[in-house]
Image: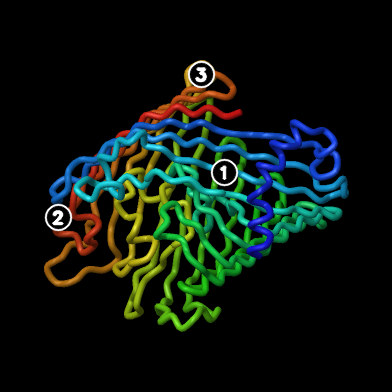
């Protein structure tokens, strides 16, 4: 696997050479194409009442990818991508400077993707470092909101041989997190089956076996009837079945469920969701989602990010409603309001885990250029049984995103 990664890390260099030498392009890479992104963001983060100062950061993500067919062999191709995150020397945020609150976008540069694809019929085989986004990223995702994404080193098979059925299986040997200290070896099996039963109904079943954490098995039904979107999902999490080194793995036996109804009608957006992550109930932890795109869940403030990723003890219920409007020439405006509660408490502590208001406005300045503004206002509960809910949190973002 290291050989594949190292060879593909040279892909961008080979592709650059191919531009200057058409003979080289013919012999090594054919039909070479490029894509990229420049994303500049200002972020301000304040956790009220703690010992650190309010953080602010101006960061830029530059991404460049290249794809080409290998040696003229039908179905064989390679993709490579590099990303560089810069803060322009402005380090008024952790982890760059521990005296400030956290903004998880330190300066960094990385080969984010480097893989070989082989397609035969309706089956895709992939080997190398890759982004993986399954369903709506509730359990497995690339954390696209942060400037440096999450990727996985492994082997993936995707099959579409049966009409309306997509089967995915992946074996992951290493995770590259949004921060270097979140990266490391793993033994993880990802299984996902998605079947479009009717135009209004899509059925999904999955099993995510994370050797260092737990096994999660679940089913989901989702779709759209007229202007109404719906989703119902339930999952069970058990002790990890894959042996990983001599790690003292946690014990877990917890339930997850989620239900959602939403609509977009004449530009108006409305929806309501209830999500529940089960408590520890005598085990070492409750239901957690360590490989998810966590920023998409439990509010933009990320108040519960660490709690739902790894340390859930008392459970967490999240009921939220959204209301907004979208229209060509206007953009998209959206407001989301969350109410959080724990599932159990201890003596003298409250199940109340705070509330949050999130605001968003996005406007496409051009087909390849978008401006985005976001704000999050988390109102904490000082007596909550969940320590992560104790303090108020305020965050603001302004972002310009150019893709090419």
Q: Position of residue 279 (x, y in %)?
A: 34, 70
Q: Is residue 274 left or right of residue 110?
A: left
Alpha carbon distance from label 2 to label 3? 42 Å
Decide: is 137 above or below 265.
below
Alpha carbon distance from label 1 to label 2? 43 Å
From the image, state whether disc 2 or disc 3 is nearer to you: 3
Secondary structure of residue under mark 1: strand
Residue that numbered label 2 is attached to: 382
Residue that numbered label 3 is attached to: 365
| Residue extending furthest toward the top | 329
- Residue drawn at x 70%, y 56% is 195
Along the polypeptide, which appears first: circle 2 or circle 3?
3
Residue that numbered label 1 is attached to: 82
| Contact flag, marks 1 and 2 (Cβ < 8 Å) | no
Along the polypeptide, which appears first: circle 1 or circle 2?
1
Q: Label 2: few (<14), some or many (≥20) within 10 Å?
A: some
Along the polypeptide, which appears first: circle 3 or circle 1?
1
Secondary structure of residue under mark 2: loop
Q: Which residue occupies the foreground of this view, 155 or 27?
A: 27
Q: Which residue occupies the foreground of this view, 175 or 387?
A: 175
Decide: is 237 above or below 230.
below
The quarter of the picture where the N terminus appears is: bottom right
Q: Is residue 43 visible?
A: no
| Contact flag, marks 2 and 3 (Cβ < 8 Å) | no
Indicate how the structure is coloured in the image. rainbow
Alpha carbon distance from label 3 to label 1? 26 Å
Q: Position of residue 68 (x, y in %)?
A: 76, 42
């Amino acid at each position: 696997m290291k050989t594949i990664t190292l060879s593909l890390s040279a892909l961008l260099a080979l592709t650059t050479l191919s531009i200057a030498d058409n003979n080289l392009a013919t012999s090594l890479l054919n039909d070479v194409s490029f894509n990229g992104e420049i994303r500049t963001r200002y972020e301000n983060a304040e956790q009220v009442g703690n010992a650190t100062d309010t953080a602010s950061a101006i960061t830029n993500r530059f991404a460049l990818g290249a794809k080409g067919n290998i040696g003229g062999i039908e179905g064989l191709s390679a993709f490579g991508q590099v990303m560089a995150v810069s803060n322009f020397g402005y380090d008024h945020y952790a982890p760059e400077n521990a005296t400030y609150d956290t903004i998880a976008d330190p300066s960094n540069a990385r080969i984010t993707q480097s893989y070989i694809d082989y397609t035969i019929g309706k089956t895709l085989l992939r080997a190398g470092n890759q982004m993986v986004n399954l369903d709506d990223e509730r359990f497995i995702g690339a954390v696209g909101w942060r400037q440096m994404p999450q990727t996985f080193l492994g082997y993936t098979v995707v099959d579409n041989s049966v009409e309306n059925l997509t089967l995915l299986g992946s074996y992951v040997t290493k995770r590259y997190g949004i921060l270097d200290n979140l990266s490391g070896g793993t033994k993880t099996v990802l299984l996902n089956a998605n079947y479009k039963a009717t135009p209004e109904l899509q059925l999904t079943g999955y099993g995510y076996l994370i050797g260092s954490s737990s096994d999660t098995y679940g089913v989901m039904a989702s779709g759209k009837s007229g202007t109404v979107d719906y989703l119902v999902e339930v999952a069970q999490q058990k002790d990890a079945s894959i042996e990983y080194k001599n790690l003292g793995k946690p014990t877990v036996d917890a339930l997850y469920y989620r239900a959602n109804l939403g609509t977009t009608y004449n530009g108006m957006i409305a929806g309501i969701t209830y999500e529940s992550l089960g408590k520890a109930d005598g085990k070492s932890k409750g239901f957690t989602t360590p490989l998810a795109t966590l920023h998409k869940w439990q509010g933009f403030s990320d108040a519960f990010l660490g709690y739902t990723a790894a340390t859930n003890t008392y459970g967490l219920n999240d009921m939220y409603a959204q209301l907004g409007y979208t229209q060509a020439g206007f953009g998209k405006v959206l407001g989301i309001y969350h109410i959080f509660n724990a599932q159990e408490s201890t003596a003298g502590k409250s199940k109340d885990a705070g509330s949050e208001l999130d605001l968003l406005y996005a406007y496409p300045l051009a087909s390849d250029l978008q401006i985005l503004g976001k704000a999050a206002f988390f109102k904490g509960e000082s007596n909550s049984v969940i320590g992560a809910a104790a303090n108020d949190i305020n965050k603001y973002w302004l972002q310009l995103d150019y893709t090419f």
